[in-house]
Each structure stands twice: as structure tokens, then as C-alpha cells.
Image (spheres, helix red, strand yellow):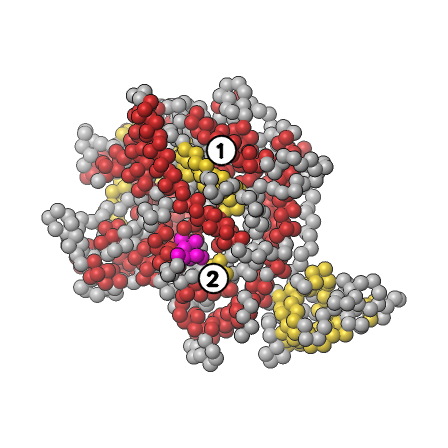
Amino acid sequence: MTGTEEQLARLRGGQLPKTHNARTIAALATNPGCTRRAVLDAAAVDKAEVASRAGYPAPFGMSPFALGRGVAFERRLKDEPEKDLLMLLREALDLDIAEVGFTDLNEVGGSTDLAVRHERTRRLLTAAPDQRGTLFDHPLLRFAVGGRHAYLEPDLIAFRHDDTVHVVEIKSFAIIDDQADGAKVAAAAIQSAVYVLALRDLLGDRAAVHDQTVLIAPKDFSLTPVAATLDVRKQISVLRRQLSRIAAIDDLLELIPADVTFSLEPDRGGQSRRDPAELLRDIRRVQASYAPQCLASCEMCYLCRDEASGTTGALGKSVREEAGGIESIQKVLAYAYEKDPYPVPEDVTEAAAILRRAATLRRRSLGDPT
Amino acid sequence: MTVLTSLARIEAASLGRAQLIRTVRHVHVSDRPLVLIPIGLAGEPCAPLAAMVGDDRLRPRLLVVASPLNRDERFAFAADLASVVLGYIGSYLAGHEPADKEPYPDAPQLIVPNAGGVAFTRLLGRSIRFRPAVGEGAVPAAVPVLGRWLTYLAERSHPSASLILTATGALAAHWATGQSAVEDENLATLLAWIAPPPGMSGADAALVAEDPARCPPAGPATDPGFDRDVLAGRLTAIRDARNAADMAAEQRAIAALERELREVLTPTWRLMWQGIDLLRSLPEAGHVADRRKGDLASFAGYARYLADGGFPQPRKDAAVDAARRLVRLEGDQQRLEAQMAYDDPLVMAEYRMTGAAFEGVVTHAEPARLDESGRKAKLRPWIWVETTDEVTAGPGSELRSPARPGQKAVVIDVDQQEHRTLVTLELQNGMGRGLSPAPGSVPEADDVVCYTTLTLDFQPSPEFPSREDTPWTHGGPPPEYVATDLDATEAWDGADWADDAYASEVLDGGLAVEEGAQ
């Protein structure tokens, strides 16, 4: 174990590392400036467990109905691939072969062991083109994040005759009149981008992994599938940048006091014995960069929001900008309302003058003549 | 957001209570709005689960779908909703026979909790407006009509219009809370900041309101925990009772589902009316009635179009229609911004911050000044205004004053001094016909006046080609709408909805996946 890995293991405590998936890797790209998130993720800490023990359970969850729909839709597509799936892919990717081999990589001879599945995926995908096949269902890829390997499982990948590989993402949100929920499409695109990177790692220069991925989703109010291509070049570069930051985790670790740990100190039954106040104290010793967007993507959000109360950033990025970048709410109000002469540091003179003017206008417009 | 609204948010966070960012109400609130809270089954694009609806706060109607994945029950729900919504809309048409192209005296107003509510309204409208009322796959005649009205209303969701409102949008447009704009989309926390319970700060009340167990979400999505712990069991019980053809058990199971859903929806129902009361407590802004006229005309136009057997709205706008809509929305937005500034000193203050408006005191006035440079003398009074605001307008700029919106004032001179600016203005009209100004038409010394580059002038819309003349660059003339059998089967094929297997996978599958993952 290297020094970095030792340090990360200590931060994590006795718990098993939380494995990454495409969704969690994609989430890394949403708040790249946050040291707390970068460190927790690099150490593979189970953020939901830690946040909950510290007194701030995460507000996330997925409805079983949404899960059930996702499973049902994918099963319908793959149970009879020749029915819709192949036709859609032929059209979307211009596959010109009549016969298409469909290889199920969900399990290997009844084994669902991850290492075995990954090995078989690797062997099949790197085989000579004439013995390889075309479509691979749930291949198991490996991807390095923060010095550790995460297993990733794309819904499907497709080889074209010219040896380009396409990631296929199957989603159960509807495409209605050729339009889908923008946020959901964006999430699908960045997840596909993670798979593209993982496939490029695996295939090296054996085959080109295309930056156009395919999204298959139900049409309108039915379960009839339609395909759309997504250009994920931008997402790939965003991810690369963020992953390289995590790779540079050593620089961040240097900032963290040596006795900080996120260990939950579980007993034999798995119950945490860690003192919540002490855990919270340790969490707070690693700097966070809270923004309201975290509420949609990070398990630590309620904890960080509470910590950030009293700052302009907690009210939104635009509020902080309008307040001239001043972080403290109390300072903003002092600059805006305290009687002259109130000591204003030189670097915020201009911002303070604008705030003071805004405060005067606000007061007068609300009928206060003073 | 502007410096002023951001400062208000910061004040709210510090004081623990939302702060007004408007002095008057810039949206029309009907005397009898129809409140609609739709909720749908998670994962599905538009599977109504229940709705609480009505125009009487004491008597909400609860509509529940016992098998939300069953297509017939979905249309039965739509038919029930149609009886409420079309009854409400019809009450604005009945008993009035306005002349051709004249509006009805009043128009409906649908209020939904949040932007998700509008999206759900739009999708529900989309899913039923093409349904045929006769022939194969026929649904009750009111269902496609409801679809057209819901589509029409959802398309009119815009801050300048009032045929449909979101409670969160209307409230957040008038109050700044101590939370972020993202969090303001939660009706319960937004109201917690605006009107916290006695003895509680807005921040604390918002924390309580954020807990889905104590305050169920306002839809259209339900709390995933509720889905897992309550709803899944209720829906399964109904299915099992039906499969066993046990009528008594089915009745009990449906009653139990209704009880749960009533409990989920009732808190939001109360919040909706609380929000409406709060909006009504603000005095209405001067130009609201003017914008309402546009709503009345639009409503009357669409009601007549439908009465004449109009087609359902197309799946996608044709090129010309899309361009026209964009221009209309841009124009509406500009007009709204200018009118709000004229009506509300707090909005005008935002323009004063940026130099697009200034307020000051008239130091001197020459009300009888004549311009005798031409053949005929013209009345052209000058006034001198001293202001501490920033003035970005230069000589030759044409300004207006909210106090006299029809009167043009041209900047003659801007004299920047150390802490103040002296602006000389020439008034050009709005003073009566003679060579001496009508009383009150020219500001006098010591008057406080406000001048701005914003105008209320109507911007004429550009000319658009007719449908038939749509240029080839935009796809050429769109095809005329012809009802086809495709509409009846469109998007419902594959037996998806009649398919009990799919319903079972959704009901049981998700729970199985969750157990497997643990």
C-alpha cells in the first residue's frame, strides 16, 4: 500500500470501500471545487452512512415503481433483441450486417463474481474482430478512480463493422414528441461518457470508442423503444478534468489533519459506535464548498448546507455574486446598513458602496424615509 | 436576480423571515380560482395517481386511480377530472353572448403548486387530446376536450399571463426567502419562510416543512419512502383483491388507498389556499388589469375555436407558429418588465441601480417655455432635476416618467457634479392643446420625479408568412391536420397498458430490486 492509500484507508476507517458506479463517478463532475467531496469519494467512504450518523440523513431515494419500470423496460428490449433492439441499433449506428451476435455477459457459467465477469468481458472485447461478436449485454468494465478500481456495467455496447465501439444507454424516461426531460438526458449523457472512458482504458488502440453514444428510451406513453444519439465529447472532457483532480488527491490530503477519520467504528452487528458529535467535528475539518445544486447530487448536502448557513453562497451562486463575492451575511448587512463610517476593507469598497446604495433604495421604496 | 433581490434574500436569512421584493402584486388572482394538485406514479411519463381539485377551499374533490397503470382507469380519471375542469371553464362561458371577437367578462384561472404541476398538466393534456370519442378505442367525449384545454392552459404559463399560475412561482416573485431559489420550488418550505407558525423562525419552519414524513411533497412526484412503505402495499392489495374477484376486499383496499392519498394531498391543499390568501393580501399593481385583458381575449378566442370544432394542438409547433410564439413571449416579457417598473418603486429601484432610471427633485421649472425656432411656436417646458442616482442617459435620449407615462421628456443636458447630477429635460407633449400647459401636466419645483429609458410603447410584431407560404428553409407548408386511426392507437400500442405483466413488474419488480440490493 502506498502512503496515499494508507491515508485514504485511515479516513475510511474499518468500513468496506463504497464501490463507485457510473452515477457516482458522473456526480464527481458536478461540484469539482469541493475538497470534502473529493476526499470522501477518493477514500470510497459511504457518504450516506456517514451523513446519517452525523445527524444529517440524505434526502435521496428512488421510488420502487421507477426502479420496476426501468427493469421491465430493459427486460422487454433484451428478452427478444431481434424484435426491436437490433433494428434500432442498425438504424442508429448504420450497422450493415444482417446477422448480429448478442453476447450476454450478465453472468459467466452461472457465476456473477465480478472479477470473473470482468475477465470474460476483457477477453471477449479484445478478441480478434472476426471472432468477437457485435453486441454485448452488461459487460463488466473496470475503471480507476482515486487509485482504486471501480466496476462499471454499461447496459449494452455495440461494435460496428469499422471497429468503432458505441456505448448504448437504456433509460426508462419517455421521449415524448421527440423531446425528453433535459436533466435526465444530461444525466444519461454523462453516465455514457464514464463508460466511454472505461472502454477506452480497456481497448486501448484495439478499437476506437466513439464519442457518440446511443440512448434508447420509450416513445411517448408506450414502452415502444426509440433510439437517439448523444454527443458526449463535452462530458468526456469535464470528467477527465475532474478525474485528474482526484488523481491529484495527495495535494488535498496534505491539507487534512492526521487524526481526522470518517470511521463509523461499527460493532459486530454493523451498528456504528462512533460518537456523532466527534464524527461531525472531523467532517468539518475538511473544507466543503456548498452550493444549492448539491441538494440534487450529494449525500452530504444537508450537513454542508447547515454548516454554510450564514453565508451568501448558501442562498445561491448568483446571490453571492450580487453581493460582490462577500461570503458573510452579517458583513453584507453591516456594509449595507450600518451607519457611516463603518470600517470597510479596501478590496470590497466598491461592493460595499453598491450594497449601501441598494439598501437605501430598498428602504425608501418600502416606505421608510430614513 | 438583482442586487436588490439578493440583498432581500440576505436580509431574510438574517431575520429568519421572508422579505417583500415587490410593493404591489403583479399578477391577477381570480376571485374563484380552480386549484389543481395532480400527483402521478413515479417513473411513468404521465400516469395520474390522484388529484385534489376544486374552486372551494372547504370542499376539495379527491380523484383517485386505483390501478394507475391501467389505461381504462386512466381515461376514467380524465373523465372525472373533465367534469370538474370543464364545468369550471363552462361557468365562464354560460349566460354570456358577447359579440363576435369580444371577450367574456371573466376568465378561468388554474393554480397548480409548482412548475412540475404545469409540466404534468401539459403531459396529461398531450396524452388525451388526440383520443377519439367514437370508433375504436373511444373515450368519453369530454376527455379529448379536457386534453385541449389543459394543453392550452399549460402553454400559457408565463409570468405575464394569469390563466394558469404556479403557487411557488407567484409567491417567489413577490417574496425573497432566506433559502435558495432551488429550494423555493418547494411550496411547503417557501410558505414556511413567508408565514412561519407563531413563535417559529422561517428557517426552523422550513426545516420541518422539508421532511416528507411531516409535510408530503406537493407533487407531481410522491415521496419515494411513501411509495415504498405505503403506496406499494395499497396498490398491491387492490390488484390482489381484483385478481381474486373479492369485491368486498377490493372496496376496502380502494378506501384505504383513498385515505392515504387524501392524507398526502390535504396539507398541500391548505398551503395552496394559504398562498392564494397571501397573494391577495398585496394590493394589485396598476397594469395587472391591462395584462388581464390579453388573457380574456385569448380565452375567448380559444373557447370559440373549440366551439367551432377546432383541431387538437399539433404534437409540434409548425415553423411559423413557433416563430410567432417566440416573438409573442419576448414581447410579453418586455412589456411585463416595463409595466412592473412603472407600477412598483421597488422594481424601478432595480433600474435606478443600473442607471436606466433616476429619481430626483425638481429644482427649477419653466412650464411656459416656448420653442419659437420653427414657423409656429410650440410649448416645450424645461425642468431641471437634481439626483444622486447614476444617470446613463445622454443629451437627446427620450425618457418617460411613471407619473406621466404618455409624456416624452428629452434630455437637454446632463451636468455631473461631485455627489449629484443635474439633468435638464424638455417636455414634448401631454400638456393639452394650447400654448400654456394644462394644470398638473408639468412637474413643479420641489416635486419628486422619476425618469427612465423604459417605455410602455407597444412594439409591433414583425410580419410572418402564412402557413401556406412557409419557406422551404423551414420545411415548407406544414400538412393540414387530419384525424387518423393513428391517433387512436398512437403511443398506446404494444398492449402496454392492458398488460398486467407490466403492471406487476412495476409494482413488484422495484421492491424486489431493492431487497436484492440490500
Q: Chain of mark 2?
A: B
Q: Is residue A162 left or right of residue B482?
A: left
Given residues B418 and B231, the one toward you in this image is B231
- Magenta residues, start to end: B189-197
Instruction: Look at mark 2 in the image and give the residue it sits on.
Output: B19
User: From the image, which quarter does the C terminus of chain B lie in?
Assistant: top left
Q: Position of residue B268 (x, y in %)?
A: 42, 45
User: In the rendered image, is residue B166 in sight?
Assistant: yes
* Image: A169 above or below B207: above
Mark seen at residue B62 = none
Q: Position of residue B256 (x, y in %)?
A: 33, 33
Q: Position of residue A330 (x, y in %)?
A: 40, 70
Label 2 near label 1: C-beta < 8 Å?
Answer: no
Instruction: Look at mark 1 in the image and give the residue it sits on.
Output: B81
Q: Position of residue B245 (x, y in %)?
A: 32, 20
Residue at far left of view:
A268
Respond whether the residues carrying marks 1 and 2 are from the same subunit.
yes
Residue found at x 63% / y 79%: B417
Question: Type of residue at label 1?
Answer: Leu
Residue found at x 54% / y 66%: A366
Query: Which element is circle 2 on?
Result: strand
Question: Type of residue at label 2?
Answer: Gln
